[in-house]
């Protein structure tokens, strides 16, 4: 027998002895002190003497899975987590550290070590086993956790999640507040129930001074979104509660929504300062890891601008680096975001990723209003929470039971399923106006687009700049001579110019990055164009020119790109098809000519796919979207 065989046999004999000893103790045989093993009977017994780590870890995981009913341990963001209350009793998702995992393993099984006498001594789970279980690449049998909900929710199939505990379908943990009583929700609500549900929703929002029906309908969308979030595939936009003065009701509305959805006012924080993307990343990663259904950016000041926030809205999962650790995590992002502020301004990509709830009390001191139907509104909402939830669920079930009819509202780009679900629920219940103020939102909140259009127009009108192909250095030099052009600098470029004048930082580099971010963008009838590199410096040259619609044939494969429809005369269409069919091939015969047709076909009946616009003009490439590519023949 070889040395290896001898060691294997010795270990096998030791395992057999350990298992036999555990079996004797489990059946009341003599143990170390002549008694059976400590702890309740029926738990698995794991011996740690003379055994390989993978074998012990496999038994430990099996014991953890067996004991995890109902679930207390979950898998989330590539690690083990648990749900625990914070100091205010609010449930949060917390990483399962080594000590906590060791505690769960010690309660899931009885652990023993063989002694020389042949008896088994109880021990704690060895640290190497605890670390190995926590570091496994996967944990079969441990349920995945998407997030927490504190009210009944709608599942993707339209059914109601109303049983407390873990829901395997949505992978949500439903933890209602003690005493929450939601009346039964009919699977197919009748007209009387739907009318009553609409009355309840309108009643709770009655005291808030919405500017238009669209704002009121959007407030209804804000209320419904957390309740149906798990039924919405993909992303949801930020709700912007906007008022001209403090005390009008923007914070009151979000607290009403939060109390209905979670049982308490929403967690709030102020937004990090503009340009502080590191703080944005830390904040939003924490929000995603927290797993709560609702989060509020409160009392915005100045223009809200953050590439990280814009990316967070459209990212699921959201990837970031954990503070204090050299570790990148990927967190499911199902949170509903709301932002509040007075006369909110948005910049960058944010204007097209929000919807607007505007309120205006039309008085000098809105907080002194006396005409309230519910003077203590939050107390009223807390007391009527069950009925308010019933109303929201009735409206949702009404839409699903009727086959989910598509709403007439134009989809909000990037949030099509949210528009379909929320717009369908509201419209089918007779609540009209949803997203009807989107154009006004762009006109009033988008601070970046008008600033860039004004800057580029002055650039184009300047006799020294005009439509010349210029290096950034030349533009910077001219800025030093043109006070009007400096005054029109967009976004945060004025601050960068001041820092440059004080000898802090390179304005050329900052302007170059800003131009690169706007390359080929159209503002009004002007386009910022990236041109060829300068042969001597190898730097990019830039040009501002009047935009000309390209004389190109749109693709018939993708149904029209960049706002150009594939509806065009038969001759051009035949040529396009011949070109597409011949990609990657040598054509054997030229396409058969088609007789020219002078009649212009009717404009597309569907909206433009990139922007959702419905205004078209006939150009060399076919019907062209007037929003994506304004007609150069029409004066602005």
Image (cartoon, rainbow, N blue to C red):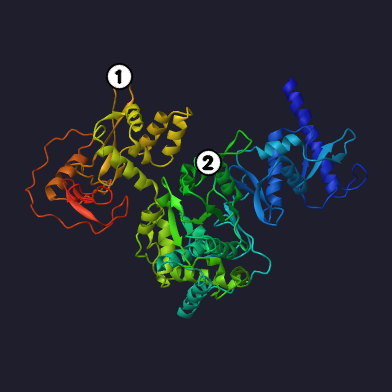
Query: Which label belongs to residue 536?
Result: 1
Q: Relative to residue 307, is residue 407 drawn left or right?
A: left
Q: Quadrant of residue 184?
A: bottom right
Instruction: Residue 492: give its label.
Output: none
The spot of residue 557 in percent (x, y) is 25, 46
In the rendered image, which quarter is residue 56 located in?
A: top right
SS class of the residue under badge 1?
A: loop
Q: In the depicted view, which residue is nearer to us: 242 or 411?
A: 242
Residue at x-position 25% and y-position 39%: 461
Does residue 12 appear anywhere in the picture?
A: yes
Frontmost residue, 258 versus 481? 481
Please indicate whether residue 510 sits to the left or right of residue 60 in the image: left
The residue positioned farthest toward the bottom in the image shown: 192
Q: Residue at x 51, y 45 (%)?
A: 317
The residue furthest right is 33
Q: Secondary structure at mark 2?
A: strand
Where is residue 563? Give x, y as percent. Answer: 27, 48
Q: Residues within 10 Å of mark 2 (few under 14, many from 20)?
A: some
Q: Quadrant of the N terminus?
A: top right
In the picture of the structure, the residue carrying the numbered disc 2 is 319
């Amino acid at each position: 027998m070889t040395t290896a065989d001898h060691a294997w046999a010795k270990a096998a004999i030791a395992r057999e002895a350990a298992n036999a000893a555990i079996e004797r103790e489990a059946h009341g045989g003599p143990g170390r002190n002549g008694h059976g093993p400590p702890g309740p009977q029926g738990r698995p017994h794991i011996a740690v003497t003379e055994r390989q780590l993978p074998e012990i870890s496999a038994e430990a995981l099996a014991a953890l899975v067996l004991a995890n009913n109902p679930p207390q341990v979950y898998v989330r963001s590539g690690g083990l987590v648990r749900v625990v209350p914070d100091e205010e009793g609010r449930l949060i998702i917390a990483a399962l550290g080594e000590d906590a995992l060791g505690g769960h393993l010690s309660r899931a099984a009885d652990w023993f070590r063989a002694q020389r006498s042949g008896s088994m001594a109880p021990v704690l789970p060895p640290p190497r086993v605890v670390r190995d279980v926590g570091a496994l690449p996967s944990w079969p049998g441990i349920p995945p956790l998407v997030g927490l909900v504190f009210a009944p929710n709608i599942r993707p199939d339209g059914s109601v999640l109303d049983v407390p505990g873990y829901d395997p379908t949505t992978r949500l943990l439903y933890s209602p507040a003690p005493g929450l009583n939601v009346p039964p929700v009919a699977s197919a609500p009748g007209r009387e129930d739907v009318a009553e549900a609409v009355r309840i929703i309108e009643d709770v929002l009655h005291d808030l001074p919405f500017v238009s029906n669209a704002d009121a309908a959007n407030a209804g969308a804000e209320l419904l979104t957390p309740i149906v979030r798990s039924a919405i595939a993909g992303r949801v936009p930020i709700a912007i509660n906007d008022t001209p003065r403090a005390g009008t009701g923007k914070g009151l509305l979000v607290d009403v929504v939060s109390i209905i959805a979670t049982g308490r006012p929403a967690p709030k924080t102020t937004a990090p300062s503009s340009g502080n993307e590191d703080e944005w990343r830390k904040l939003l990663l924490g929000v995603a890891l927290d797993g709560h259904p609702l989060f509020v950016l409160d009392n915005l000041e100045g223009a809200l601008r953050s590439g990280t926030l814009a990316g967070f809205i459209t990212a699921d999962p959201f990837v970031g680096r954990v503070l204090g650790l050299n570790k990148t995590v990927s967190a499911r992002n199902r949170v509903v975001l709301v932002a509040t502020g007075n006369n909110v301004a948005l910049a960058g990509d944010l204007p097209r990723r929000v919807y607007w709830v505007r309120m205006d009390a039309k008085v000098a001191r809105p907080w002194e209003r006396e005409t309230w139907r519910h003077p203590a509104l939050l107390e009223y909402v807390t007391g009527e929470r069950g009925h308010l939830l019933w109303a929201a669920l009735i409206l949702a079930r009404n839409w699903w039971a009727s086959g989910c009819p598509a709403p007439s509202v134009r989809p909000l780009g990037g949030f099509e399923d949210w528009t379909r679900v929320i717009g369908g629920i509201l419209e089918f219940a007779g609540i009209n106006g949803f997203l009807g103020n989107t154009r006004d939102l762009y006109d009033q909140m988008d601070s970046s687009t008008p600033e860039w259009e004004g800057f580029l127009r002055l650039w184009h009108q300047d006799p020294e700049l005009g439509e010349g192909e210029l290096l950034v250095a030349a533009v910077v030099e001219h800025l030093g001579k043109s006070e009007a052009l400096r005054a029109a600098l967009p976004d945060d470029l004025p601050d960068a110019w001041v820092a440059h004048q004080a000898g802090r930082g390179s304005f050329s580099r900052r302007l170059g990055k800003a131009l690169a971010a706007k390359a080929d963008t159209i503002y009004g009838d002007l386009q910022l164009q990236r041109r060829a590199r300068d042969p001597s410096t190898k730097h990019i040259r830039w040009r501002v020119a009047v935009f000309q619609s390209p004389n190109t044939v749109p693709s018939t494969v993708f149904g029209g790109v960049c706002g150009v429809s594939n509806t065009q005369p038969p001759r051009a269409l035949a040529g396009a098809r011949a070109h597409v069919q011949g990609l990657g091939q040598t054509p054997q015969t030229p396409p058969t000519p088609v007789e020219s047709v002078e009649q212009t076909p009717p404009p597309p009946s569907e909206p433009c796919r990139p922007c959702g616009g419905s205004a078209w003009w006939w150009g060399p490439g076919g019907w062209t979207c007037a929003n994506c590519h304004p007609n150069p023949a029409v004066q602005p």
